[in-house]
C-alpha cells in the first residue's frame, strides 16, 4: 500500500440509486448511458468511480482513528459524450482512469 492507498476493484455496473443519491444522475444524465434493467433493478454503466468508493467506505462502521482512508483504482469509465466535447472531433465512449478517493478527518 504505497502512500497508504488501498487498491480496489469495483464493478463497471452499479445500482442507479447511488448516482441518484450523489446528485450525479441529475447533473450529468445527458453524458451518461441510459440505465439498464436487470429484473427489478436499474443498473448504470459507471461514468466515474467516486460513488463506488463511497459505497466501499459506507460498507463498514469505522472509527475516526481509521482515517485517513484512501482508495486507488484503475477503472474503466463509460460516458456518452457528444462529438467535440472532449477534444476536437473525437467522441468519448470508454476510457480508463487511474483514480483515487480519500476520506480525511481534517477535511
Image (tube, rainbow, N blue to C red):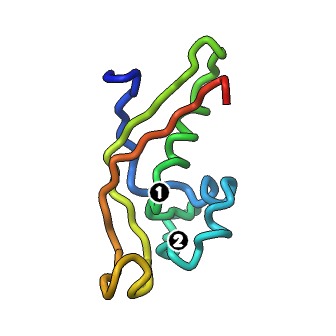
Out of 35 and 28, give the one closest to the viewer: 28
Task: Give the vertical position of 87 relative to 53 (above or below).
Answer: below
Cα separation between marks 1 and 2:
15 Å
Q: In the image, residue 4 lies at what x, y percent?
A: 40, 21
Out of 29 and 35, give the one closest to the viewer: 29
Q: Secondary structure at mark 2?
A: loop
Q: In the image, residue 62 lies at what x, y percent?
A: 62, 19
Mark drawn on residue 99:
none
Q: Which quadrant of the figure has residue 63?
A: top right
What residue is pinned by disc 1?
A: 48
Q: Secondary structure at mark 1?
A: loop
In the visual, does 50 lie left or right of 7? right
For the C terminus, which image quadrant?
top right
Crowding at dot 1, Cα within 10 Å, few <14 / some 14-19 / many 20+, comes out as some
Q: In the image, residue 43 lies at what x, y percent?
A: 51, 62
In the image, what residue occupies the spot 61% across and 11% down? 65
Crowding at dot 2, Cα within 10 Å, few <14 / some 14-19 / many 20+, comes out as some
In the visual, does 36 lie left or right of 73? right
In the image, what residue occupies the spot 58% across and 60% down? 16
Task: Give the vertical position of 61 relative to 78 (above or below).
Answer: above
In the image, what residue occupies the spot 39% across and 27% down? 6
Out of 85 and 78, give the one closest to the viewer: 85
What residue is pinned by disc 2?
A: 35
In the image, what residue occupies the spot 44% across and 81% down? 85
In the visual, does 75 lie left or right of 82? left
Amino acid at each position: 500500500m504505497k502512500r497508504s492507498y488501498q487498491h480496489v476493484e469495483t464493478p463497471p455496473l452499479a445500482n442507479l440509486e447511488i448516482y441518484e443519491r450523489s446528485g450525479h444522475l441529475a447533473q450529468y444524465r445527458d453524458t451518461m448511458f441510459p440505465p439498464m434493467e436487470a429484473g427489478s433493478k436499474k443498473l448504470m454503466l459507471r461514468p466515474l468511480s467516486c460513488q463506488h468508493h463511497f459505497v466501499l467506505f459506507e460498507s463498514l462502521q469505522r472509527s475516526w482513528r481509521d482515517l485517513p482512508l484512501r482508495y486507488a483504482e484503475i477503472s474503466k469509465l463509460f460516458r456518452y459524450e457528444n462529438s467535440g466535447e472532449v477534444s476536437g472531433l473525437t467522441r468519448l465512449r470508454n476510457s480508463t482512469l487511474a483514480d483515487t478517493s480519500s476520506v480525511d478527518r481534517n477535511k
